[in-house]
Amino acid sequence: MAQKPYTITLIPGDGVGPEVAKAACRVLEATGVPLRWEVQNAGAETMEREGALLPQAVLDSIRRHKVALKGPITTPVGTGFRSVNVALRQSLDLYACLRPCKSYRGILSRYEDIDIVVVRENTEDLYAGIEFERGSAGAAKLIETIAQDGYPRLGLDTGISIKAISEAGSRRIVQFAFDYARSHGRKKVSAIHKANIMKFSDGLFLEVARDVAKGYQNIQFEDVIIDNLCMQLVIRPVQCDIRVLPNLSGDIITDLCAGLVGGLGVAPGANLGEQAAVFEATHGSAPRYAGLNKVNPSAMILSGIMMLRHLGEREAADRAEAALAQVLAEGREVTYDLKPTRDDPSAVGTSQMADAIIRRLRR
Ligand code: NAD
């Protein structure tokens, strides 16, 4: 009897999202795993059409099918436009952001043999969106309360963003990192923080991490201050294993680690919670390249491969990863960012790179 298809919520996103999403879907389908896509839209264009940035139907679809593949969605800087990506993670309580950064042969990069896994807390910290605008009544009230608590009085021209980190939020993300280490044969988890300065937020995160570590005797634990980590990553990145971080520093460090393995074009990710899993590349919507069939689909394809593993389709995932690795190693049918120079005329487009991967999958 034919295998029942998996129904996956597909959010193509905007900018380069639809192009890389299409490439990823084609590669995943070529593995032979039966997949049925339920397409849902979110973002600025959806707002214009349907009056909501993140329509309820999108959340309902993901809750129903429990798995989504998502393209990037634009968040304009410094406007009132709330990030759909952050809203999605918060609404579905996708508290763990898993971002593996692995070297593939053929990718021009300063380093080889990197295999770092970044586990980023996804719901708290400065990303929670608790902010008070300069000159607002809320900001004035907070400034007053802070002064009454004995701190220097902030000027009324101050804007305030709250960094809130909880014991429960820290416990579940550190436990996630250790459980991931245990199930993937990893030896060490490092908690990254700035607890020496932010004693009650990162300090709490560290205190909880130390406590959680006691329950995992076979996995080493260490803590590293984030500025020191940045230096270590640049000097000796190969030494790293699993890094668990609060939300904002996790965001920054994942881009740094993506840079170590060849750039955002090859950095996949997953947002995981108890109820649902949303797979998406680390990169954004790269609006400059939208519609040009130019950007690298690898990050999105690798995110889809993570999705196959999540579905239990390990063999198909391994085949797809091997086909992609082969195309990368050969270095011929790859996008501009993987060529020695950015204007290399032999670079192929997004869909042609997907074709090359599919051809190797079918051999
Ligand atoms: P970006 O990742 O979109 O692009 C930065 C640069 O990285 C690009 O100009 C390009 O040179 C390179 N790049 C990105 N993806 C690439 C790919 N697949 N292949 C080759 N090169 C690639 O980052 P940004 O410019 O800071 O953000 C643009 C928009 O995307 C913003 O609105 C931001 O909020 C949004 N964003 C969304 C997500 C998401 O949906 N999860 C994540 C990050 C940023």
Image: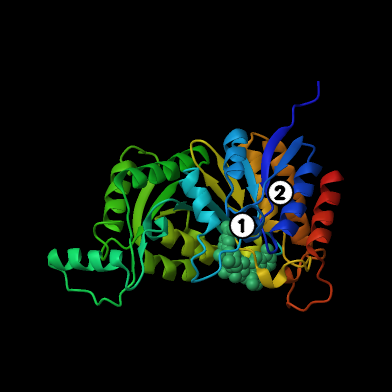
Q: Is mark 1 within 8 Å of ligand 1?
A: no
The Cα atoms of the two marked residues, 2 and 1, are separated by 36 Å
Type of the residue with mark 2: Glu
Label 2: few (<14), some (14–19) or many (≥20) C-alpha neighbours in 10 Å: many
Q: Is residue 354 left or right of residue 314?
A: right
Q: Earlier in the sequence, mark 2 or mark 1?
A: 1
Ligand 1 is found in the corner quadrant, namely: bottom right
Q: Is residue 256 left or right of residue 41?
A: left
| Residue 215 point in image, percent of width and height | 33, 37
Residue drawn where x is 44% and y is 42% of the image: 176
Q: Is residue 204 visible?
A: yes
| Residue 48 point in image, percent of width and height | 64, 59
Q: Is residue 111 left or right of residue 40?
A: left
- Label 1 secondary element: helix
Checking the image for residue 47, the label placed there is 1
- Label 2 secondary element: helix
Residue drawn where x is 37% and y is 65% of the image: 226
- Viewer-closest of 38 and 251: 38
Checking the image for residue 321, the label placed there is 2
Q: Is residue 97 visible?
A: no
- Viewer-closest of 236 and 319: 319
Residue drawn where x is 83% and y is 76% of the image: 345
In the displayed structure, 330 sits above or below 157; it is above
